[in-house]
Amino acid sequence: MEILEVRRRSGALLEQLLELWERSVRASHTFLSPAEIAAIRPDVPGALTQVPHLVIARERETPLGFLGAEGRRLEMLFLEPEARGRGIGTALVRYALDAYSLREVTVNEQNIAARGFYERLGFRTVRRTPLDEQGRPYPLLYMELPEP
C-alpha cells in the first residue's frame, strides 16, 4: 500500500474518489437516508478540489481510502468498506499527524465507529453541537488530540 498527497486532481481521480466516498458513506453513515446521501453527493467534488491537502492510500493505482486536511484539522476521511479494519485509516491519519501536525477532527455523533476510531488514536471530545454545519439534525462532536 502506498500513501501519497495528491497534487494533480484529475477528473478521473475525482470521479474515483466520489464513488469511494459514496460507498463509504452508505456503509458507515447509516443515520443518513439514501435521499440525504444523494443530496450531499453534488458537494463532494468541490470539497475534494478545494481541500488544501488531499491524501490517498492506494494499491496498484486503486484508491482504498482518502483524507483531506486543512491547517491542523482533518476535514474528511473515507475508506472503501472492505478496506476497513486493515489499518488504512490509521495509516492515513498518522501520515497527516506527521505531515500537517493534525490536531482536530469533527465527527457525526451517530457514527459510533468513527468516534471510537478517533478515540483509539487519542482524540478527545471538547465540544458538541446538536446540528451539523449545514443546520441538519445530526449532532457533531468536535474532537482534539492533546498537545504532546
Image (spheres, rainbow, N blue to C red):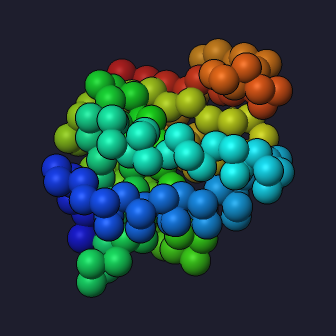
Q: Is residue 10 left or right of residue 80?
A: left
**Looking at this view, is 118 or 148 the one in front?**
118
Q: Tell me residue 148's x, y (percent).
A: 32, 25
**Which residue appears at 17% of the width and 54% of the height?**
8
Q: Tell me residue 46's x, y (percent).
A: 42, 40
| Residue 103 versus residue 55 in the image, above or below | above
Q: Is residue 115 visible?
A: no
**Looking at this view, is 98 or 148 the one in front?**
98
**Looking at this view, is 81 or 101 the one in front?**
81
In what quadrant of the picture does the N terminus appear? bottom left
Q: Quadrant of residue 119?
A: top right
**Looking at this view, is 122 or 87 the one in front?**
87
**Which residue appears at 29% of the width and 52% of the height?**
55
Q: Is residue 17 visible?
A: yes
**Which residue appears at 41% of the width and 63% of the height?**
15
Q: Tell me residue 38's x, y (percent).
A: 69, 52
Q: Tell me residue 36's x, y (percent).
A: 76, 45
Q: Residue furthest bottom?
A: 60
Q: Quadrant of residue 47?
A: top left
